[in-house]
Amino acid sequence: MMPHITVLPQGLQVVAQPGESVVDALRRQGWRSRYKCRRGGCGVCKAQLVNGRVRYLQPVAESVLGTTELAAGRCLPCRAVPVTDVVVDLGAEPLRAVLTSNPVSRTTTHE
């Protein structure tokens, strides 16, 4: 079963492929969230993991995402691979459609 990713505050939902990060799942389905390096080195994408579990296929530097932040539910969506269905709060910066014909039929929004 492939995990569902729900993105707050928009309520957008996408499905992650096996081994796919949150950012990559969003990009594959026509959405862009805040990120810069996509390697977990800058911390620009840092978000709140509201629910669910993620894992990191590669180590994340303590200087970018420390144990205190991890314990508080912070994650790096550019590297975070969902293990279960997850809810991620990206904060005030909205998702942007990167395709002119965004595949809305493959996503579900929740009010």
Image: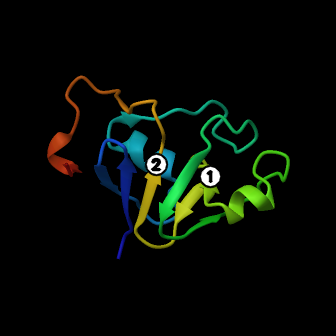
Front-lying residue, 46 or 58: 46
Write the residue at 62% across / 43% down: 46
Residue 59 can be seen, yes or no: no
Amino acid on which disc 2 is placed: Asp
Front-lying residue, 89 or 44: 89
Q: In which quarter of the image is the N terminus?
A: bottom left
Residue 4 can be seen, yes or no: yes
In the image as oriented, which residue stretches furthest toward the left? 105
Percent x, y of residue 36? 63, 30
Rendered view: 58 above or below 102:
below
Percent x, y of residue 102? 23, 33
Q: In which quarter of the image is residue 100?
A: top left
Answer left or right for 106 relative to 28.
left
Write the residue at 74% across / 36% down: 42
Percent x, y of residue 25? 42, 50
* Labels 2 and 1: the sequence-earlier one: 1
The residue wearing badge 2 is 89
Callout 1: helix, strand or loop? loop
Answer left or right for 26 relative to 66.
left
**Is label 2 or label 1 in front?**
2
In the image as oriented, which residue stretches furthest toward the bottom? 1
Q: Distance between the residues labelled 2 and 1?
A: 15 Å
Disc 2 and disc 1 in contact, CB within 8 angstroms: no
Q: How is the image coloured?
A: rainbow
Answer left or right for 97 relative to 80.
left
Callout 2: helix, strand or loop? strand
Disc assigned to residue 79: 1
Write the residue at 46% across / 30% down: 93
Rendered view: 82 above or below 79:
below
Percent x, y of residue 73? 61, 60
User: How many other residues sit within 10 Å of disc 1, few (<14), some (14-19) or many (≥20)?
Assistant: many
